Image (tube, rainbow, N blue to C red):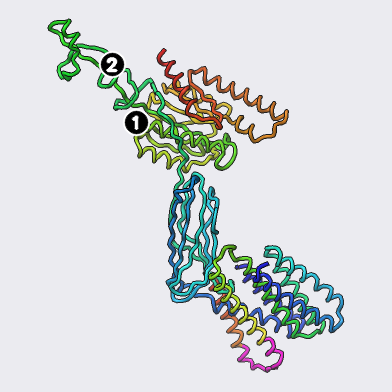
Amino acid sequence: MINKLLTLILLIFGLLLAALITHAGDLALMALPFLAYLGLAILQAPSPGRIHLQARRTVEQDAASAVPTFQVNVTVINQGGQAVHLSFADPLQPGMTITSGQLHTLADLPVGQSAALQYTFQAGRARYTWNDLRAVVSDPLGLVETKLNLPAAAQVQVLPELQKFHPFPLKPQHTLPSAGSIPARLGGSGTEFWGVREYHPGDPLRRLDWRRTARHPHQFFTREFEQEQIADIGLVLDGRQKINLGEGENSLFEHTVRAAASLAEVFLRQGNRVSLLIYGRQCVSLFPGYGKAQLNRILHTLSQAVPENGESLDSLQFIPLQTFSSHSLILVLSPLAPDDWHLFPRLRAYGYQVLLVSPDPVDYAWRMLPSDPTTRLAARLTQVERHLEMGKITRLWIPVIDWQVSQPLAPLVRLALGHHNNLHDQ
Amino acid sequence: MPFRRILALIFPLAGLACLVIAFIQVQQWLALAAVILPLLAWLFSARWTYRGLPLAGLLLSIALSGLGLLIGVAPVLMIISAALALAGWDLLLWHYTLPADLPAATLSRLAYSHYRSLALALALGLLAALAGRLLRLQLPFGVLILLVILALFSLERLWHSLGH
C-alpha cells in the first residue's frame, strides 16, 4: 500500500502547489479531505512497539488422497495491547498446487483474538519449507503499514513415488563378505550344495559327509554349501537439465527419479549395499549403506533432486567414480546426450560392472509433437543417432535398457540382468 | 456485482453528478463533455480489477474539480466531488485486496472498521473544508508557525511509520 500512500501525498502536495500558483484558496480547501484521510490513517496506525503477534503453523497430510495432499493451518494470535488490522500470506512454493483455500487473508484482530489461514495443496516431489509468516499490520484504511516476519516454521518432504519390484536375480562378479541372497561362488555356509572337501578341525559335525567318510577309512570329509552374500550397487542419476524433457510430474527426469527410487528400494530390500550419485549442476552423493535407513536417505536425497545445468559438469565423463567402491555394480540412469558414451569405457576400465537404463527421449518427445512427415523424419534420424550411440556402449558388453517411459521398467531390468548374468556365466 | 463494488461506484458517480450539475449551471459544455472520461474510468474499474483504473478515475475527477474551481463554478460542489472521488478510489482499492473466500464474519468486521474510518475521514475533511469556506480567520504569525511545526511533526511521524 506504499503506492496508495505515495499517491495520496502527491495529490495533497499537488493541490497545495496548484493553490499557491493560482492563488485559489479553494484548491487548498479541496486538499483538506485528503489531509483528513491521511491524518486519520496515521492516527489509527498501530505503533510498532506495541504490536505483539504470535503465529503457529501445522501441516497435516491427507492420508486418504492418492496424490500427496497437505493441509496447512496458520493461526495468528494478537498478544499485543491494541487491536490490529492484519493481512498475512504464505508464499507459493514451486511444485505446490493449491486445491482449496487461499495463500493470503485479512483480519481485524482485537486483543487476545486469533485469525486463521487455511489452505490445501497438492504437492509434487520436493521439500517444502516454511520459516516464517509474512504479516502486514496497518491502519484500517491500509495506508501506514508495518511489515513483520512471524516465526512459524514447518517442513514437509514429498518423497518420489515408489514402484514395488519383485527381487531381481543378481549375479555380480564381486560380492561383499556379508550374508545376503546372492550366490557368491564360494564354499561356506549357505543353502545350495557347493562341494566336498577334507575335514578341518573345527568343522561342525553335522556337515560331515558320512557316506564319503565311510568309503575312505581314516579320512573325514565335510560338505560345503555355496555362500550367499550381498552386492555393492551404485546408482547414478543423470540430473542435467539439458537432457531433460517436459515439465512437472510427467517430465523425463521425474520418470528417471521414480525409476532410481524403485530400483534402490528393491536392491536394498534384497539386502544389498546401495549408494547414489546425482549428477547435475553439482554432484550429490550418498555413500554406500544398507537397509531402511539408507532407503530413507536415498529417498530424501531424491526428493530434492532437480534437473540443473552446470557448465563444469556438462558431460557424464566427469562423474567422480571414487564415490563407488571398486568392482561394484553401477546402474546409470540417463537419457544420454551425444558423447556421453565416453563414460562407459572408463567404467569398464576401472573394473565396474555396468548397466545402463536409458529413458528414451525420442519416444517421449514424439508423443508430444505433431505427427507430420517432417517430425516423423526428424524422430527417425534422432532415433538412429541414439541407437548408434548406444551401440558403442553395447559393444563394451554393457547391457543397455532402452526404456520407453510408458512401459514398465521391471521386466526390462530383469531381462537385462539375466542377460548380464548369462554373459558372466559363460 | 458485489455490494461493496456497487457502493464503491456510487461515491464517485455521485461526485461526477456534482460536477455535471456545476458545469451545467455555468454552461461549460466542454468541461461537461470531459466528465465522460472519469465516468469511463470509474465504470471500467468497477468491472475489471486493475489498480490503475481507480487511480485514473481519481486523478481525472480531481482535475475536473480543480478546473471547475478555476473557472468559477460552485466551490462546495467541487470539494464534495473530489472527496467522493477519494472515497470511490479507496473503496475500490480496498475491494481489490479482499481475498475471495474470506469468512462472512471477518469480512463484516473488516468492512465495519474500514467504512467507519473512511466516513470519519471524509466527514472531518469536508467539515474542515466547509468551515474554511465559511470562516475567514486572520491567523497571527505565531499560530501559523505552530501549525507549520504541527505539519512537520505529522510528516516526521509519517516518515517514521514508513520506516517501520
What secondary structure characterizes most of the magenta part?
A: helix
Q: Give the vertical position of A239 relative to A35 (above or below).
A: above
> Taking A263 as reference, is A104 above or below it?
below
Q: Secondary structure at mark 1?
A: loop
* A93 on left or right of A266: right
Query: Which residue position holds label 2?
Result: A193
Residue drawn at (51%, 48%) of the image: A123
**Residue B87 falls inside the magenta stretch:** no
Region in magenta: B128-144
Q: Quadrant of residue A187?
A: top left
Farthest front residue?
Answer: A64
Horizontal relation, residue A173 to residue B145: left or right: left
Amino acid tagged 1:
Gly
Q: Are marks 2 and 1 on the same chain?
A: yes
The residue tagged with tag 2: helix, strand or loop? Answer: strand
Compare residues B40 and A131 and report the one nearer the observer.
Answer: B40
Quadrant showing the C terminus of chain A? top left
Q: Which residue is mark 1?
A: A271
Which quarter of the rendered picture does the N terminus of chain A lie within? bottom right
